[in-house]
Image (spheres, grey):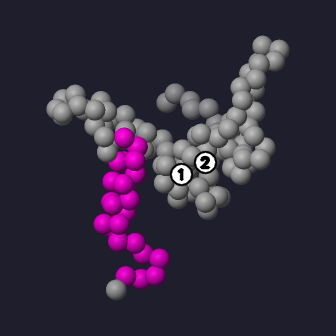
């Protein structure tokens, strides 16, 4: 019997496989491995970026921190917004009635607050 709060190692692997399939590994574009190598790399990079996005931007939002890729796409990446131009600047205006507008705004502020990466 596993202690409370402990997850099976197999369950973690199954979660990663399900996430990778949702990020593009479920539909490889070609029939040969040589043609699909770039697709696999891009899907793995997308899965890693999605995981880092949730970790850095939504760590205090229980509805988004463990969300599946489909949920993140629906709530965050596909949010209703308009791109406005004024005085040679661009503004992205989100719909105020969208339930996750505050989560998107908080995520943007957290990304902007990250320190600039310095070359080693």
Q: SS class of the residue under badge 2?
A: helix
Q: Which residue is mark 1?
A: 71
Q: Is 13 contained in the magenta span?
A: yes
Q: Is residue 25 left or right of residue 106?
A: left
- Note whether residue 110 is visible: no
Q: Position of residue 42 (x, y in %)?
A: 37, 34
* In the rendered image, the vertical position of residue 116 relative to residue 64, given as above or below: above
Quarter occupied by residue 18 = bottom left
Above or below, 89 against 82 in this view is above
Residue sitting at x 72%, y 29%: 82
Q: Which residue is mark 2?
A: 75
> Which portion, as a residue range, is magenta?
2-24
Decide whether residue 9 is among the magenta residues: yes
Residue at point 59% right, 39% down?
78
Residue 4 lies, in percent from the top left, at 46, 82
**Front-most of residues 8 and 119:** 8
């Amino acid at each position: 019997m596993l202690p409370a709060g402990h997850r099976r190692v197999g369950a973690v692997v199954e979660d990663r496989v399900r996430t990778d399939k949702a990020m593009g590994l479920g539909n490889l574009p070609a029939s040969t491995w040589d043609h699909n190598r770039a697709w696999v790399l891009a899907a793995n990079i997308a899965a890693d970026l999605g995981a880092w996005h949730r970790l850095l931007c939504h760590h205090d939002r229980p509805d988004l921190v463990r969300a599946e890729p489909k949920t993140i796409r629906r709530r965050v990446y596909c949010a209703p917004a308009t791109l406005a131009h004024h005085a040679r600047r661009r503004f992205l205006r989100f719909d105020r009635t969208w339930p996750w507008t505050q989560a998107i705004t908080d995520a943007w502020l957290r990304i902007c607050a990250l320190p600039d990466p310095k070359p080693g």
